[in-house]
Every structure is written in structure tokens, then in C-alpha cells.
Image (cartoon, helix red, strand yellow):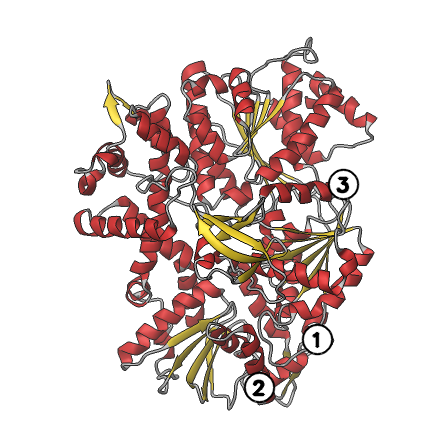
Amino acid sequence: MLHSTIGYQVIRRWLDAKQFEPFPFQEEAWQHITQGNSGLVNAPTGFGKTYSVFIGALIDFINRHPENYLTKSKNGLQLLWLTPLRALAKDIGRAMEEAIAELGMNWKVGIRNGDTDVNERQRQKRQMPEVLLITPESLHLLLAQKGYAEVFKNLRIIAADEWHELIGSKRGVQVELAISRIVHVQHQHYGTFCNVWGISATIGNMQEAQDVLLSPVQALSGKQGVQVKAHLKKEVRIESILPDEIENYPWAGHLGLKLVDKVLPILDQSKTTLIFINTRGMAERWYQTLLTAAPELAGAIALHHGSIEQELRIWVEEALHTARLKAVVCTASLDLGVDFRPVETVIQVGSPKGVARFLQRAGRSGHRPGEVSTIYFLPTHSLELVEVAALKSAIAENYIENRDPMLLCYDVLIQYLCTLAISDGFRPDELYREVTSTFCYRDMTEDDFHSVLEFVTTGGSALQQYDEYKKVEIIDGIYRITSRRIAMRHRMHIGTIVSESMLKVKFVHGGWIGMIEEWFISRLTPGEVFTLSGRNLELVGIKDMTVLVKKSNSTKSIVPSWQGGRMPLSANLGKKLREQFNSVFKMQPDGRMVLARAKDIEMRVLQPLFKLQEDLSHVPRANELLIEHIETKDGYHLFVYPFEGRLVHEAMAAVLAYRISRIMPITFSFAMNDYGFELLSDQPIPVDDANVYELFSPENLLTDIQRSANSTEMAKRKFRDIAVIGGLIFQGYPGEQKKARHLQASASLLFNVFSEYDRNNLLIRQAFQEVFDREMEEARLRNMLERIQQSNIIIRFPERLTPFCFPIKVDSLRESLTSEKLEDRVKRMQELGG
């Protein structure tokens, strides 16, 4: 059927002229699009996911206008393309314009995001382009314009690009709400509704991801969506960069930079290499170290992360396209699907923390169908080599993480109601049906919706005395914002999804350099030197939310750390990691345990470390939990190794400390990494065979979390973000944003007021829920405890520190020692054999 259409034949002639052959999954998507279906396309990076939807929209248009598709112009918005990153919009827009020009069609492609200038916005308002590439935030700004329904009159397709990145975040919730509004408005005003298509890399819960995106259109049309899968195997080659000598006492962070000489030959033999670093601070250090090791790379190597000034980031992206750069040191800022064809090689420094992220980064290389994606893994300490073997196993089994959708985000809903109230207003009964057609709010009760309405109209029971919280008025049954001041403040606030408070960094006499987190810069005094954007900068002062600096020739500088840099190990990678230890030893007929011949080189080079661990203590199998009691001059240590990631370990350490304190009064300090955690006390810790299963029981977990971890303090911090998103706290006008600590003070006051006078407040409930779900990973913690109940718990009493506990011990020292002193202390500990 598709092949006989004029649209397909036009596209096919164009592709034949370019000697391109479409993939079966692309043709399958085109077929569904021309039949008016909605769906989700899943394909590996570099196989043309974009064209599977974009070309489908062109075929559909040509089929509907076979006589004049070449000359027909000013067709109104046909394709709304949602993208999570501004950088993606430019790249995709360029590819679309090229295709449209070669086909000789009269379509225009527009971009709408925070960088779009006022003149371009006005042009779009007068005449919408046929394709509009837009971020979720800018789409909500579009919904805040009077008469916005007219914009979507001719819309045929909404495409959500990189949907795997948006789902599981509040920006994903913004997308859900925007889709629900557009399809309902179209249906109500014009008796039609557009189709919705997601484009996603592989995640574990692909069907759920589809349901989240398509929920409103499925509810309205009664038609189920389709899933288009590319049955293409992207070959990934994983090479480990092995240190010349494996330290039996590893510690995090020290190994990476020492392997810089092994990185230089890889850069030499590749046209272009991306070097992924997990944190912005380490990216800065790697950039400097590479330049010091190979000065000839000056001008051929660049740095790219989210805190670098936008113009410089755009320059780096353009230089990558044109193969002018030999290497780019980057963070997750280049994770997403920007199509850099010259990239041949990727280097991952340190644990990628998850299978999906590792695959995504690998896919940045060999970005053409049929090419092999080559990724080198460079460990920052020797135990991370076990993760490479775990990654290989997970990739072979296609064992990819889920991205769990967010549910009942009342802060985003409050913001959205105010957005609709400043444009054409809304009727609550209609809107309730519309909002509950989304996946996020499908379980919202009418009572909770009325609480949200009460909140935006009166401030709710706790704030009804204050006029500034009475934002929305009810006029003839329609909820509207009529105050120009409230409308202006809300317009500036639309799309706000809170991240760490950032300050711009600028030369005293000159241009912008980038962004830095307020919490970091507030700890520095004028005259101190820090590194940003590959330069050493001396702090002059802070004025109007801007950090003023001058160049510094100092050789010593402080490398900034960003709060967002500490991602936890994923549950999937943790499981595969535990399984790796099963094959380290094998039992001889006489009952002796000897080292087994390992399949992966990474496990073979670690055998001396495993032997030492077994001699001193034990190497835990997948069905075992190892606990070590060790006494040193610092006190009594309890080390536990669940291999479940930093966040779970932090929560578990607090729960365990609380449960032990009920046995006897005892105080602890904690340390943790992705592999395990430590409790340290000045007296022996009463954990033994008699009580250990009870201490690791899932019984009363939620109560014990609330009593043990400072969940109220964590909820207060989380509430600040929720209050900002929900518009309870105004962040200030441009150039005079409130400082983070002022926002925290305002939020704490509101938190206390709600706790006292409005016990059932939705936003307080949400704050605690987000702490349990996101900060403490309560569900994962519970699963871990249930697993431990079915496992053998092995308790050992080593005479000294073991290879497994050493990195946790070093992490606990990191807080109190400078890097030079830490290095000296670690060397002494290693010489003493722990």
C-alpha cells in the first residue's frame, strides 16, 4: 500500500539518486504514519531514527497534495518536533532543510527555544513554519499565548525525539501535559487530532515508555499505538585501557589521570575522539592534563560541558561536524543524538554507572549504519575493571535499564494551570478529564485536583490570607489570570525545572566564560584561583548573580565540583557486577578454592587482587552478602558490600545505624561508594550471626527510613525545588535573581507553615515521595533487603583493611584531607598493607 503512493515514489526517487536504501523499520514507520497511526520508533544510534518520522510526515503531505506539493507553501504547522536539547535542534533542523531543498518543496523549518530571538518569534507568530523544532519549556510558552489553538489547526504529527531522555523527568511530564492539551484542543475546535510519535534509544521498559507518551491520544482516539523496532544489531567493540600494574589496594580517582600516556596513541590513530568524563570538574582536569602531556594538541582539542558559555559550546559542536578537532573532552552534555559523523572513537573515563548510558556513548562513534562503535574504557581505580566485564555481559544479553516515569507531580501541574490561565483560560471539569488522560496524572483523584484548583485560586487553607497566592480568578466559570503583574511573573517562570543554582562567570573587563554552581563559589574568597572552561581564573568578587574573575598564571587551582556529578550505579549493572564474582574461584575435588581461568581480560588481570581479598576475607558470590568487621587505630569499622549504588548504600547505612542503636546506644560516622558502605564507631559494633538477618530485614522499612535518615531535612531541600516549580517562590527578575539561600529560607518557612496548618498539603506529600523514590531509591532498597533475606550472609574479621574496603575507607578520608595529604596518607596505608 505504501509503495503505491505518490509520496513514497517521490521519496524513493530522491533516495535512489543519493544511492540510499531505506531500512525496513523506516518504511514500516512511514506506512503507519500514512495510515494515521501513533507509535514509538526504537532503533540504535546512527541508523536514521530521525528520518523514520520526518520522511513519514513528508510522504503524508505529498499524498494529500499530489498535484501541488512542490509549490504549496504557507501550509501552517505540520510537524511539531520536540527535542530535549537546544544543540539537537540546530543539528536536526540542518538535516531537514537539506532534504526539503533537495526535494524542491516549499516547506520552512523553524526553531523555537531560549536562544530564538524576538524577531524570529514574531515571524513565527505571523506565519508558522511547516516544521517547528521546540524544547518542552518553549512549547509551554507557546501555550501561554492568546489564541494558541490556531497554531495547531493543521498539525499532523507531534514527534518527541530522544524520548528515553525525557521520560523519568519533570520535563517529560511537561511533554505529557502539552500533548494532552494539543490533541484535546484540536479535537474540540477542529474535529481532528494529530498523531504522536516517539523516537527512542533502547530502554528496558519500552512498552511503558510508549504508553506514557501516547496515553492522551490513545484515550481520545481509542486506537492503540504501534511499536516500530529496528532489528539491527549495532556492533559495539569494548577495549579496556589496562594499567601496567594493578594495585591490590585500589582507590577511586587516582588511576585515571595516570593513564594519560595510554590515551595519546588512541587519539593519534583516530580522526576524532570523544572523551567522556562523569563530572565537569574531572573534565576540566583531563583537558589540562592532556594539554600538558601533549602541547601539540593545543587548538586541536576542546572542552564541552553544560557550564561552558553557549557560544563556545556551539563552536565546539560545529568544529566536530567539520572534523577540525582531534578530540573533545566532554560530559553528558554530548550524550544525546547530535550526529557527529567524523567521530571514530569514544573513550569512557571511569564507571558509566549504567548499561544504557554506556551504549549511548559508544553509539556516538561509528555513526553510520554498518560501522562498528568502538569504545575504550579507562578505569579510575582497578576494581572498575570488573564493571567492564559486567557491561560486556549485560550488552550481550541486551539487559538495559528501565526509565521509570514520574507520577503525580503536582508542582508541574500547578505551573501548567497558571500557564493556561494566562492565555485563554480553562474550564476545570474539561481540564480534569484532559489531565487525567496523561500517564502521570491518571490516578489523580477529583479531591486532589480540587486541592490544586484551590491552591491556584486562594493559596489553599494555609495561605489564603496572602493576596500574592490568589493568582487565578474564576470569570463565568473560566479560570483566568487577569493581573498583568502576575501574568508577567509567570511568563518568566514557565518551563522552570529546578537544577542547582547557577551563577554566570565573566571577566572583569570582557566576555562570558561559563556557569558555576553557587554552593561552590560561595566557599571561595577573592584572590583564590579556580579552573573553568580550561582556564585558571582568579576570583575578584560576586555582583548581581555574576562571578567576576581575571586571568591567573597560578599553577595551583581549585577544580570545581558540581552537585550533579555523582550518579549511582544502576540496579542492572549492580546485578551483573555481583554475577562476575561467581566465576573468580572454582572448587577443587579436595574442597580447596583456586582461581578459575577468567574469560575476560579484565577479570584475569585482577586475579592477584581477588586472591588477596580471599586470603584476608572473602570474595562474595552473587547469592552472598559480605560483611567485614575490622579494628584499626581509627576505631571499629563495619564494611558491607551489597553492590547496589551510592544512594541505596547511603540510605541503608542510616537504617542499619538506627537499628543497631536500638540494640545499644552507639554513634557512627558513615562512608559509602557504589560497591558498599562503612559504619565507623569508637566501640565494637554488635552485628553477628544471631541478629544480622533481622538487621537487614525489609520489615518496617519505611518507618525506619523516616526515623533514621534525616528525611525531613531532605524533604525540605526537595520542597524548595517543588515550591519554585509550582510558583510559590518567585526567583526574581532577570539580573536580580534571588540567592539560593534566600530561596531556601522562603521554602523552609512555607514548609513549616504547611506542616503545621495544612497537614495534607499535596506539595509536602510530593516532597517526601520524591525523597523516598529518587534520593533514597526506597523501592530498590526494599528489593535489596528481600534479596539479602534469600542470600547467605558471610561475616569476616580481617586483621587489616582488604582490597574491597580500601576505596570506601579512602572516600571517607577525602572529606577531611586535601588531595596532596590524601595521597600521602593512602601511600602509607598501602605500605602498611592496608
**Do we see residue 148 in this rendering?**
yes
- Side of 733 where 78 appears, left or right: right
The structure residue drawn at horizontal position 43% and vertical position 50%, both measured from the top left corner, is 501
- How much space separates mark 1 and mark 2, taking CA atoms? 27 Å
Number of residues whose C-alpha sits closer than 10 Å to that of mark 3, classed few (under 14), some (14–19) or many (20 or more) = few
Secondary structure of residue under mark 3: loop
- Disc on res. 70: none
Residue 448: image quadrant is top left
**Residue type highlighted by circle 2:** Arg
* Residue hosting label 1: 604
In the image, what residue type sits under mark 3? Answer: Thr
Tell me the CA gap for discs 1 and 3. Answer: 41 Å
The quarter of the displayed image where residue 90 is located: top right
Q: Which residue is mark 3?
A: 322
Disc sitting over residue 828 in the figure: 2
Quadrant the N terminus occupies? top right
Residue 252 percent across, percent down from the top left? 57, 71
Question: Looking at the image, is mark 1 or mark 3 earlier in the sequence?
Answer: 3
> Would you say residue 219 is visible in this rendering?
no
The C terminus appears in which quarter of the rendering?
bottom right
User: Marks 2 and 3, how far apart in space?
Assistant: 49 Å
Residue 330 point in image, percent of width and height? 64, 53
**Callout 2: few (<14), some (14-19), or many (20+) C-alpha neighbours within 10 Å?**
few
